[in-house]
Amino acid sequence: MRLTCNLQAALACILTLGSAVAAAAPKTMFLFKDVLQSNTTALTTSGFNTLLIFRIGLTDAGDLVYYSTGDAGEAVDAHVVSNGTYTGGSALSDKIRSFKTSPSSLVDRVEVSLVSQDTTFQIIRDLVASEGTGSNSTLYRNFQALQTAWDFDALNNDDEGVYDTTSTVAFAQMLGGLGLKYTIAPYTNQAFWADAVSRLNTETQLLDHVYLQVYDGGAGNDPASWKSALGGMKIAPVEWVVNDAKPYEGTSPAAARDEFAKWFAEGSIEGAGYWNDYDVEKMGSSYTEYGGVLTEVFG
Ligand SMILES: *[C@@H]1O[C@H](CO)[C@@H](O)[C@H](O)[C@H]1NC(C)=O
Ligand SMILES: *[C@@H]1O[C@H](CO)[C@@H](O)[C@H](O)[C@H]1NC(C)=O
Ligand SMILES: *[C@@H]1O[C@H](CO)[C@@H](O)[C@H](O)[C@H]1NC(C)=O
C-alpha cells in the first residue's frame, strides 16, 4: 500500500496505515458514452483504475446487448452475444481489452454494468427460475462468451427496481464461478443490499465493492450509514460530474474533492468515482482534474 499522505486525507491515512494488506482504492468512472467514441487515452491515463461499461441488457431470449450513447447523444445498440456466441465484433472487444493493456494505462479493472431501467433483472429472475445457472444455462453460456471476448473482471449490479433476492444471489454466484467479482451500485433499499452482501460474502468476498450513488435519487445517502448497514463494508461513493441534463446535480472536481476527503477522513469510504464520461466530454470538463481528485484523496 502507499505510504504517502496528504493534508486532506491525513487522519484517514494514519488510520489505514494500521491495516496491512488493504486492497487498492477503487477510483472509478462509469462509461455511459459508446466506448468506440469516447476518449480512451484520457480515460485510461487520468487516475481512474476501474472503468464500468454502462450498460449490458438482456433480450427476452437472454441474448446480450450493449446499449450506450454516441457523441451526438444518439442511442447506440450493439448485439454482443447470441445463444452462447460472441457477435459484437473485434473492434469492440479490442477496444475494451485495450483499457487494461494499453502501454500507459492506469486501469486494472473493467466492470460490466446491468441496470433495471431495462427489463434485464426481470429476465434474469425468469431465466434463473426456468433454467437455473448451471453450465448449460443461457445465462451461464452468454456471460461466459462475453467474458471470454471482453476479458472483464466484475459485474456491477445497478438494480433499481426488481430486487429479487433469490435470483440476485444465484446469478452472482454463477458469475463467481466464472472467476468474476461482483459489485453493486445502490441508491436506495438498504435492507435488500444488506441481505445480498451477507448472503454473498459468507465464505468469500465475492461482492467486493459498493459504488453508492450519492446524486439524484441517492443524493441524501450517507456513506457512514451504508457502511454500518452493510456489515462494515467500506463504500465507494459515486458523484455525478458537471452536466446539462440536471445541472443542479453536477459536482465540480473541487466540490468532489472536499466531499470525498471528508468521508475518507471519517473512515466510511475506501475510494470514489463518477457518473459519467459522456458528460465530461460533452461539457468540455477535464478528466485529469476529476481523476486527479481521486489520486489526491486516495493515493
Ligand atoms: C483526449 O484527451 C486528451 C487529454 O487527456 C486530449 O489531449 C485529446 O485531445 C483528447 N482527444 C480527443 C479526440 O478529444
Ligand atoms: C443454440 O446453441 C446450441 C449449442 O450450440 C444449439 O444446439 C442450438 O441449436 C442453438 N439454438 C438456436 C436457437 O440457435
Ligand atoms: C446442454 O444443452 C444441449 C442443447 O442445447 C443438450 O443437447 C445437452 O444435453 C445439454 N447438456 C446438459 C449437461 O444438460
Image (cartoon, rainbow, N blue to C red):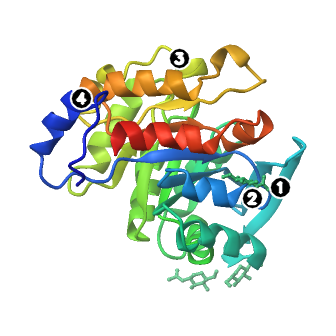
Q: Is residue 149 above or below residue 119?
A: below
Residue to which mark 3 is pinned: 219
Any mark on residue 267, and which? 4
Q: Disc 3 versus disc 2: distance between alpha carbons?
A: 30 Å
Residue to which mark 2 is pinned: 65
Q: Disc 3 versus disc 4: distance between alpha carbons?
A: 20 Å
Contact, CB < 8 Å: mark 4 with mark 2? Answer: no
Residue displayed at 27% across by 53% down? 23
In the displayed structure, does residue 25 sit left or right of residue 2?
Answer: right
Mark nearest the camera among 3 and 4 is 4
Along the line of sight, the residue nearer the viewer: 153 or 10: 10
Contact, CB < 8 Å: mark 4 with mark 1? Answer: no
Contact, CB < 8 Å: mark 2 with mark 1? Answer: yes
- Determine the secondary structure under disc 4: loop
| Residue 52 picture location, percent across and down | 57, 51
Mark nearest the camera among 3 and 2 is 3
